[in-house]
Image (cartoon, rainbow, N blue to C red):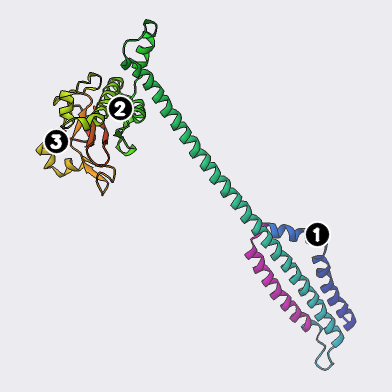
Amino acid sequence: MSEQAESSGVEAALAAPALDWLSESAARELAAYLLEHEPDQIRADLNQSAVHLARIRERLLLLVEPPPAAPPDEARLAEFERTVSNLQQQLDERAAQFEKANLDHAAERVRLIEERQAADGRIAELEAELSEARQAVDRLQAKSDSFAAALVDRGPAPVELADEIAEAEAQFTIAGVIEMSRDRCQRVVMPDASLREIDTLDVDEKAADWARELWKALRALNAYAEESEFFQGGFWEWCEHSNSEHNLWPATPKKLAMSESDTVKNDSRLWRMRRFLVDAKVSPNGYQHMEAHLKIAEGGGQHIPRLYFHDDVKGRTGQIHIGFLGPHRLVQTSQS
């Protein structure tokens, strides 16, 4: 084969892949490649392509190198170098375009993620507001039922209201009494932390009876606090001598205890059960051991309600502080 024919073959071999690479078909394939691969993979492939181009250049130089005895064809070599340089320039331009597109894509992705996080946060806020609204509705319903039931304490009712009062009394709930007492018994403090398993108590078949007794107990404590400045003695003595039959609580061991037994006091486990949260004005560390308690229901059942309180009517707050209202089993005795 002549030198001219060989040179033409080499040029054709170079031109064909260059034209094909720049064709529309190759551009579509390149776009599909960019969508299917990660930026790090694209950069790695570009670097590998640069290496291959350098090797092609070296091989081309070897192919066009004239016989040792003949001087090199400088013009042809320069043309090949220009071709390789143009290809490298186009490759660099494409790489820059790909890098810019990748940065734009990353920025858009960050924006969408931030929008999604903001939407998730708003959804969580709305769900929390909905939950609070539902709880408020439940509390208002319980309060409404218990206010209706409390009508039985207002004295004789017209005959035509007898059925309604009987129905309201049957709907008396412990949760409703708690809400009602917070409205009407201003001298009794009952924080949320003092309430234990109220829902469990309210599903018991005796819940209505317990609720009525609890309402009497809270009214008695409030009346005692209101009359304390005109009365000498504690809650037990008030119950014994008060003339207010409407607010009277029995001063009997079956219904009221002002202290715990020595067995309970000397048992560290049982004594810890009677350590409750209290206003810092009463106790600087926020806790108070409470012994005085009302027995909402008689007997030693572990599920019946107990109400523990601290008498501060002659102290800094002038109030009765409830430390515990819940099932008896949560404040066990030596017989539990």
Q: Is residue 200 above or below residue 90?
A: above
Task: Identify the image quadrant of residue 161.
Answer: top left
- Residue 314 image-quadrant placement: top left
Q: Residue furthest bottom?
A: 69
Residue identifier under label 2: 201
Give, as a single range, the part of the protein colored magenta: 36-61
Secondary structure of the residue carrying numbered label 2: helix
In the figure, is residue 21 to the left or right of 122? right
Disc sitting over residue 260 in the figure: 3
Q: Quadrant of the C terminus?
A: top left
Amino acid marked by disc 2:
Leu
For the point 34% across and 27% down, the residue is 184
Read off the residue under disc 1.
25
Q: Secondary structure at mark 3?
A: loop
Q: Which x, y percent locates residue 111?
A: 63, 54
Point out which mark residue 162 bears: none
Kindly report the distance in space between the C-alpha atoms of the residues bearing marks 2 and 1: 77 Å
Earlier sequence position, callout 2 versus callout 3: 2
**Residue 85 coordinates in the image, percent (x, y):** 79, 77
Is residue 281 or residue 12 the one in the foreground?
281
Q: CA distance from mark 3 to mark 1?
A: 93 Å
Of labels 3 and 1, earlier in sequence is 1
